[in-house]
Amino acid sequence: MQNRFQATMRRLGLGVAAAAILVSAAAHAADDKLVIVTSFPTDLTDVFKTAFMAKHPSIAVEVLNKSTSSGVKYLIETAQNNQSDIFWASAPDAFEVLKGESLLAKYSREVDGIPSDLNGYPINDPDGRYLGFALSGYGMMWNTRYMDAYSLPVPQEWSDLEKPVYHGHVGISAPSRSGTTHLTIETILQGEGWQDGWQTILAMGGNAKTITERSFGVPDGVNSGSFGIGVVIDFFGFSSKASGFPVDFRYPSVTALVPANIGVVANAPNEAPAQKFVDFLLSPDGQQLLFDAKIMRLPVNKNAYDNAPEGLPNPFDGSIKTEVNFDSDLSEKRYNVVNSLFDVMITYRLDDLRAATQAVQQAEAKLEQSGAANAEAAALIDEARALISALPVSEAEALDPDFNAIFKTKRKSKDVKVEGRQAEIEQEWDTKVIRNYSLAVELANKAAGML
Amino acid sequence: MNASTGWTPGNAAVGAAISAIGIEIRDLGLSFGSTEVLKGIDLTIEPGEFFAFLGPSGSGKSTLLRAIAGFGPTPRGAILLDGTDIVGEAPWRRNVGMVFQNYALWPHMSVAKNVAYGLNERKIRGDEADRRVRAALELVGMEAYAERYPSQLSGGQQQRVALARTIVVEPRVLLLDEPLSNLDANLRVQMRQDLLKLQRRLGITTIFVTHDQEEANTICDRIAVMADGVVQQVGKPDDVYDTPANSFVAKFLGTANVVEGTVGRDADGAPLFRAGSGLVVPLRAGEQDGPAKMVLRPQSIDFTDGTGPDSVEAGVVAAEFLGSVIRYQVRVGDQDLLVDERHTRGVARRDPGETVRIRLNHDQAVLIRA
Amino acid sequence: MTSVALRRPARGVSLGPYVVAGLILLFLGAFLVVPVLKVIQVAFQDPGTGGFTLVNFQDFFNSALFRQSFFNSLYVAGVSVVIATVIALPLAYFTSRFNFSGSVIIQTLSFVPLIMPPFIGAVAMQLLFGSNGSVNLLLRDNFGITVPFMDGLNGVIFVQSIHYFPFILINLSASLHNIDRSMEEAAQMLGSSGLRLFRKIVFPLAMPGYIAGASLVFVKVFDDLGTPLLLNVNTMLAPQAYLRISSVGISDPMGYVISTILIIFSVFAMWVSFLGMRGKDYSTTQKGGGGIARRDLRPHEAAACYLVVFLILGIVLAPHLGLLLLSFGTVWSFSVMPDGFTVAHYGTALTSAGTFIKNTLIYAGLAGLIDIVLGTAIAYVVMRTGVVGRKWLDHIAVAALAVPGVVLGIGYLRMFYGIDMPGTGQPLATWWGIIVIALAIRRLPYALRSCTAALQQIAPALEEASENLGASKFRTVRRIVVPLMAGGLVAGFVTSFATAAVELSATIMLVSSENDAPLSYGLYLFMQSAAGRGPGAALGVMAVLIVGLATYLSHRLVEKTRRDRSTPENSGGHR
């Protein structure tokens, strides 16, 4: 037995070793190489990779797929011995982070048909570190079967998602987890103002079924029917629909169109092929590829829309209403505070927020039912509502660079002394928020008791 | 009581309810897959008897014992306990006590818990159980160790706990699977006497499995010699010793010279055993002619000074000092024989190479036919 | 004195064990301790000044959120162990007690839950058990009720229990097989049978295996990240750590503080389980005594057993059933079953699956081998030598269980990106071997538990016999210990292999070329888009099949080995 066992193990070992040698031998053999780090799905990258390699047969394109945040981490951690040529992702914030780390090379191009800005939002980085290649807007997608089953009306505006009828039916990701969600949140804040914006966001959050960990978790949940309505970036909605799921998508009137970007990595080992790829992406041929059924993104080149498929709106002819002129400076200034605040108030305390929201909604329903005006109860409900959206931090404070510095571990220099720690601040907020939520439940119940 | 020198069974009130029953085994066969390990076993064990299954490794003796206890594959044939066939009955319904070769004390229970286990299974708890556990431990002289764990006991102590654990439930029969094999020599001698006393006191029908003929001979009423899954011979130890049924039994029970030859006639027509080596031994009248084997114990051959008609010349090959006797290996023609000579002080040993005369005590010889 | 002491007194100047211990320590140091320290040092830095401080830990305990997370994690881990035990016990009992026609298949099938591909498993679970999943849709339509299987902490417990119970099953089964048969027979002879016998004799004797499995489940659930994340449960420690470490832009030290606390607590839990096992070393010289006796079942008993087994398997394999449906389904959305069926997803998946599968088999296979070699060496040094501080080898290796994959991945990039591979000039971190090592380190605790349990049941006398016959320590280990540990080693290999095959978190950081990417990376790619769901599920099914097949073959090998060893013994007629 013992011999047989040993023999088996030996054979196993030999086999594995032999296979290992084969694999290492089979690795790489091409004259020109191009390494792209991207957060885009293969459905998108494969289309461009195939088309690009058909045009430049000598260049072997290697696509490394990582989530936006791990892609950024990867580039930062590997900068000491960089092997990547291009970073290709949606969220401008990720590019801003890389730019801040001086990890992007300067490469700008003028292409006919690509305007410099859309409603005031620059399509390309003014410093020339990264370029927009497609436009994305934010909106709501919903599962039609789910809406039928629960008899839910189709929401039109962000504010619709605050309605009691949607309680427990909404899915959203956290801005700290998803660059695209951050843009959505920031869009609402810029469109409605700090206090009103947060009130909308908190009211939406109070109706949330779940806060997903990845941005793709939202369309995934809507596609499965885990929840009915999701706050998503447009192409998630379009591509889900194109894949046959019983879903639909619409832009609310307050939205922003933000470019998805591409940038050449600093010290890229294959700089020339990298630039060729960027050129290809922005060329009319490249822009056409965005209309692929699995991609469905909006080109930045106006001229590309002549061949747009049915149902895809043209942002340059006003078919998407964009009332917000996105201010990326403002967004960048309070970036971390917004993320942290969202997590403290919504992500980590979703149960409490939901309970408070539900209590208020029920009290309101009861008030309406009773018909009689009960000023005292109405005042209590208003108070409860105010408690839910009471913010532990003011807009001015959120924009204060010193306060923001608390949320950054990378200190600019050794001399910079930062007062306070993120954990301390968050605990402080947490205490307030929990108190407010439970007080809101109390007040709402009291109001309901009067009716 | 000293743990290392055994104990004398106490007078504790254990086993009052044991009534000796008989065991009858009828045409029992058993196979492991395609290997037949027990073949046509027929045995009757009397109530209260101390019975031994004696045989070498692989003879099937433990398998037979386990079959009685209900372990292992279900055998063919019948095992009657007190007249009732128990083949196919679950082990836990047989009320048959067994002491395992490695004692099989449960390491996660104290001595007292081990012994109390079978009582608890019989719904005996509380004071009654305590009393009987104490009595059983007293019986084997282990009352001082009740709270110890098996890993804290010596082999002999574990043995006695295993015994106490088995008899405390007053089983119908007691099965001992090589109970002495893991003990050292002195303890073994002490222990086998203690076992005998215990068995006599309890009066319980007991089967003892061993490969050691001395153990079996010293304490058992009757023995069954087994080889190759077959019972070779059954009887009282001395009967089997004196009249072995075949050469295997002869050799397995003590030392024996087994000489091959033929029975023929001398000039007068009297029966005569002729070995190939030229050895000739006269036989009692009435022996049939034909090929046969003659069994002759070493103590049935003497050295002699005379040159009588029944003495032959032999050469000493080797000598072994065994204490009370000296065992010589001598050669007659090409036949080697073992000869025992009583050892007395001051008498010199015969040297190898020496030529001697031996006399075969032919009325002690036993003839085995084919 | 017959008590079987495991540890023997240190023997004078024997250097061998120290060399082995040194090599292990070097390996663990280079690939676990230093990379992790490089990452979690942030936990001990004042975020303001960069100096050393413990203030972050104070913040941790001051935070209501973190305290709640800690207790939630503790609660989930504890309850998961209980439920996993309820699932594992009957399976272990039936398969080791009865001559069950499908024992091997049952053991293999019940291993399959460990092989749950990331992401896609979550989707399958939601589609089946989610609040609008198949089960609840049926319940709502027919009875007007819903059961919140997947909501909050209950969901985490549910998923974790059916995911990790094989750890208990595997270790418990191995222990049951090693029980000396006479232990059980002695109880039967005294009138015990059935469940009582199991409860009072068999299970206590199998305790070391059970504790090994249960502690693994506890620590794994306590540290696990994937399940709470996929259920969007944030108020537990591991997700808190992950969310804080991997947020864009923000690098709150609390993520690293929590990682540190996870590591320390896991080692503590393992230590407690070790204390629990101490003095319960029931090693017997009759290794391979056949385990508890198996008996044939009467027809009605067999029917009852099959009912229980299939009920359990039905629950634990439901996610895989969901995966299968998903892989063949066209669109599956808010419905009990997919709208239609197709094989097209397999075609899509196969275009890219070849390289992924090949890489996965190589990576996970090599990682498994490294793990059992390291596991055996560590278990041996810890239990059978007097090397000073040997316990620490065990503690360090087990701590790997608690290291979040992201932390290890980042640590490797920090440590090995600057070092060039000899010869090629590529950074060491981009070499595929680094992925193998990362997987091996991550899965080492599994293999180590199996190796330790296996070695525990080998009496030192067997080794002494070999040394007495002139075999060196090394040869003794190779020729006596390792063959006797075979069952445990295969169990360890299979556990490491199978779980490494679907590992994602560390590998995704380390994959630097698509040619070197394993299957889980391919899955990740598919699961990034709506159209990728079907092909992703198809790839997941392939992964499960391949790993399941490898597991089945290993089980066959073990069973055969066991039979070969026990047959002559039985026919010998006495033992």
Image (tube, coloured by chain):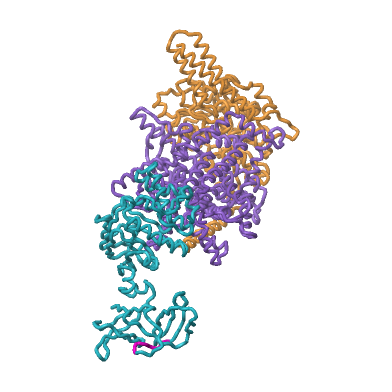
Check the rendered structure and report the hue given to chain C. purple
Residue B59 drawn at (x, y percent): 35, 66
Work out whether B97 lies above or below A231: below
Identify which residue is drawn at 27% across, 82% down.
B284
Q: Is residue B310 magenta?
A: yes
Residue B287 lies left or right of residue C177; in this view the side is left
Q: Main secondary structure of the magenta part?
A: strand
> In terms of depth relative to the viewer, which is nearer, C363 or C326?
C363
Q: Quadrant of the N terminus of chain A?
A: bottom left
> Given the current orientation, which residue lies at the most extreme bottom position?
B267
Q: Position of residue B178 (x, y in %)?
A: 40, 61
Asked if residue B55 is positioned above or below residue C250 in the image, the reply reads below
In this rendering, the count of numbered labels is: 0
Magenta residues, start to end: B309-314
Q: Position of residue C477 (x, y in %)?
A: 54, 60
Figure colour of chain A: orange
Which picture quadrant has residue B173?
bottom left
The colour one sees for chain B in the rendered image is cyan
Q: Quadrant of the C terminus of chain A?
A: top left
Foreground: A277 or B144? B144
Which residue is situated farthest in the right direction here? A415
Residue C542 seen anywhere in this rendered image of the structure: no
On the question of residue A221 being in view, the answer is yes
